[in-house]
Amino acid sequence: MTEPVAAAVESLRLVDHHVHGAARGDLDAEGFAAGLSESPFPAPPGTSQLDSQVGFAVRRWCAPVLDLPPHTDVPTYLRRRRELGADEVARRFLAASGIGCFLVETGYRADEILSPAEMARSAATPAHPASAEEVVRLESVAEDVAATGPDASGFAEAFAAALGKQVQGAVGLKSVIAYRYGLDFDPEPPDAGEVRRAAGQWLRDGGRLSDPVLLRHLLWAGVEHGLPLQFHVGFGDTDLTMHRCDPSKMTGFLRRVQDRGVPIMLLHCYPYHRTAGYLAAVFPHVYFDVGLAVNYSGARSAAVIAESLEVAPFAKVLFSSDAWGPPELHHLGALLWRRAMTALLGEWVESGDWSQADALRVAELIGAGNARRVYRLEER
Amino acid sequence: MTEPVAAAVESLRLVDHHVHGAARGDLDAEGFAAGLSESPFPAPPGTSQLDSQVGFAVRRWCAPVLDLPPHTDVPTYLRRRRELGADEVARRFLAASGIGCFLVETGYRADEILSPAEMARSAATPAHPASAEEVVRLESVAEDVAATGPDASGFAEAFAAALGKQVQGAVGLKSVIAYRYGLDFDPEPPDAGEVRRAAGQWLRDGGRLSDPVLLRHLLWAGVEHGLPLQFHVGFGDTDLTMHRCDPSKMTGFLRRVQDRGVPIMLLHCYPYHRTAGYLAAVFPHVYFDVGLAVNYSGARSAAVIAESLEVAPFAKVLFSSDAWGPPELHHLGALLWRRAMTALLGEWVESGDWSQADALRVAELIGAGNARRVYRLEER
Amino acid sequence: MTEPVAAAVESLRLVDHHVHGAARGDLDAEGFAAGLSESPFPAPPGTSQLDSQVGFAVRRWCAPVLDLPPHTDVPTYLRRRRELGADEVARRFLAASGIGCFLVETGYRADEILSPAEMARSAATPAHPASAEEVVRLESVAEDVAATGPDASGFAEAFAAALGKQVQGAVGLKSVIAYRYGLDFDPEPPDAGEVRRAAGQWLRDGGRLSDPVLLRHLLWAGVEHGLPLQFHVGFGDTDLTMHRCDPSKMTGFLRRVQDRGVPIMLLHCYPYHRTAGYLAAVFPHVYFDVGLAVNYSGARSAAVIAESLEVAPFAKVLFSSDAWGPPELHHLGALLWRRAMTALLGEWVESGDWSQADALRVAELIGAGNARRVYRLEER
């Protein structure tokens, strides 16, 4: 009875609405372990970051893609990776993922990873073409502008010009205000004088953009373009302070932009995915995913996905892998999502709670249709 | 082995300790969809709020009550609803719910829904009488008083008199301070001067009561009556800001009223139901339910209910539907609770963790006995 | 296929890295119920704290250790307890627990419970020796110092001397700042003047130590010793305010001590165990457990443990019972943990997600190996 569900989910060409490029070069043992962890630090002596759900999931599900048996040990796995070379490894995993369209956020360490065009080429197979679109990270645009040496009074205009150029051809924008400040930011747009003063300070001090006035200015400048605006929410690295990444903390901003026609995409959300589900349920312009948490929770990913399918309408939930670096993560994100959806929808069809037709429809919406509609991918 | 549990849960005459009236008139497609969503806004174009756990649950479990097959499509379902008429639809669902006693909160859009007496009449069958009691919403009493045009210095007394009248015959009080302000309110009672000044301001400005001083005054005036005091907590519409509806934020108030002999009933609580369970476990006067979240999580409701049965003693957990409007929600709240309890208790009896006698006793406590004891229903 | 997992988990000699002594004397009905609740208050009339997951789990799993059938009623259970006497009851449960090493926190009502040495003696069997080590509660040391009547300017030195003496032979330190203040404390160490002024105030006022300056001073004095530093986090009694016990609130402190080589052990963590898992995933010096919540959630403990095994590497998760008083809790903590791990790991091996070798390795790490490594137990 669940076989039609399994078959439909298996064959879905996914839209990965929030993802980064696959690693461009070979990864050594250290780089591989680092790529499978959100920690910027090495594991304590005598321990391994690969003794984790994500590490076990890679050994289980990715080894066969490299012609190795499931649960292959790490040294053998890395040896085989080197043998095949980074290009072939990326090609295999991206093609195996069954992702038909990548919405690639390009603003983080872009030189180490494949570009959107390269992602599309690597993922394509004779039977299945693949495409990629760009999502622009607001803070990266601002930091690039800062590097050109504007003065305080010229920053806002220079940023507007640069962003205007970058959004040509992009399908969405992304903010990492959760990392740089927190989601408990002032929901009001800063005025021109505040922006000028803050820009002056930042341009003098240098460094990463973390001034809340400027971060808010970027958001409001982004809103002007009408594209879906992605927010990092919840799970991530040590730059963030978790309780300040509760998406409910940005409720004021959600209310403030509701009439602007800008879809707000809450990314990852773990462990606040139920709060994200509430926000998506009550605000028409709010959407969310549990990407990243799916890869990192491995054998537990079905439980996390199940919690994301409680109160929000199914038109408001999206698939993403949030993979960055090891292309294992692109494949694994898709594979774990398919396994979880097959298990959950199959169970609900089996118990009679859902009809099979509804299950197939919801799988398509979350896996691809919602992203196509919200990012207007058909119009491109 | 789980059959006795299933039979006992199935035949339980429930006490729904927090519910509103069923819709008085017919519902068109828009009204029906709105009635099955906490969002005050229409769904985005190309999507439907009925593509959701609650929408699927209604089509699955409510269609048969209207002589339709499970998973009937929405247009057919609405046609059948119109054919039967609002009275018959309400009668069928309320009777099918197996709820024997409704504690009806009457303070929200009361003219659109059945009164407590009408609820009791609609739910009664020849075999099973039904009753209804009233729960008074503090803020509605205050707003009714404001409409009579008192001056600032007379407000407190006029409110006291009106509340004194309203509580005659009521079994409980309800506060929506979570919606109007947040649960992070000052736990101390305001003094007479503060109340007078705040009343003056509100009576001049008009509008809904949302002044925190007055909201707190209502709470303390309510406490005087010694009736169980219900608080909206967690999941609801866009009036609330979720992180300010964490019940832990009102811990100061819980401590402050502990010696007053007033049971504090935390309603819904999702996604903070585990925090509510902690509060109910450690404070003797605290009780909670996961109503509302049960209906909205549909096929996932057993998972939510399971989380509510972790740390709190079973004498502190109650059943509620929190239905308002479509009588489908009254039926569904009861049905999903029965399914979940049967599955959970059945599983624990099956695994040997619980005895069958304990399972039957706990089902009765949560489904009816706790509410009868806390609201003193037998004494009426 | 899961039998090897079950057998391995069953035979594991556990290290309980956070536990207190078993009750020294007999427990009457009231004392027994109080010992199985985190509430300092009696249950409301007509209810029992033993109608709870923990109460049912004791009747189910502990009765057989006293030669009674599962689910024995409470009066019979208590009669049998008295018949056997406190010593024999402690001996049976501690031996049955299969805990080979107890890291005993001795700072709470130490005169009512067995000392570490007595714990080791009671738990040992001819086949299985048992050991116990001490964990020192910082606040108790400070309160003992205060009782010796130092003046404000001598407090810091007297505390340093007392702590220096206490840590001889101890394997870790513990802070209850979550209870006494909250985890949202200032992450910076107070300066000497602040400490002197705060000490003067406290020594004049007397009472329990709850001044945040002094609580912070204790933490920083503790950090000097380099021992693992345990923090109460989350679930506990009414002294705490839950939302201030979110471990994310102490992120500033975690960052501030990262270079000090001090493992930070987050205890219990419920309902913030997923946030604790995030912290353990990204900060190399952070570890956590879900002890206490395991006992109190009984038949639901596998669900709680499952959530603790999502994003953190398995080298960062530890077993603890956090038992205090009734030795049923020491046994039950171990038993429920074994049942949950057997079920979870067995399921993951069965589904092919994990290899059996990995499952066995992870069970040993969480049950014993991580504690041995972090507390350097082999070096003793």
Image (tube, coloured by chain):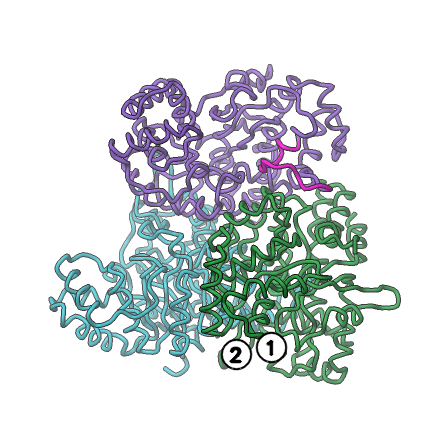
Chain colours: A cyan, B green, C purple
Q: Dot 2 falls on which chain?
A: B
User: Seen in the image, is C311 located left or right of residue A162?
Assistant: right
Disc 2 secondary structure class: loop
Residue type beneath disc 2 = Pro
Position in image of residue B347 (x %, y %)? 70, 48
Position in image of residue A358 (x %, y %)? 61, 72
Q: Residues within 10 Å of mark 2 (few under 14, many from 20)?
A: some
User: In the image, is residue C139 part of the stretch drawn in magenta?
Assistant: no
In the image, residue C299 above or below residue B3: above
Residue for badge 2: B42
Residue visible at 18% across and 75% down?
A: A157
The reply to whether residue B219 is in sight is: yes
Q: Residues within 10 Å of mark 1 (few under 14, many from 20)?
A: many
- Residue at mark 1 shares a chain with residue at mark 2: yes
Q: Dot 1 falls on which chain?
A: B
Q: Earlier in the sequence, mark 1 or mark 2?
A: 1
Dividing the picture into quarters, in which one does residue A91 lie? Answer: bottom left
User: Seen in the image, is B91 located left or right of residue C144?
Assistant: right
User: In the image, is residue C45 part of the stretch drawn in magenta?
Assistant: yes
Position in image of residue C264 (x %, y %)? 38, 36
Residue for badge 1: B33
Q: Which residues are magenta?
A: C33-46
Check whether the beta carbons of the residues at disc 1 and disc 2 lie within 8 A of each other. yes
- What is the C-alpha distance between the residues marked 1 and 2? 9 Å
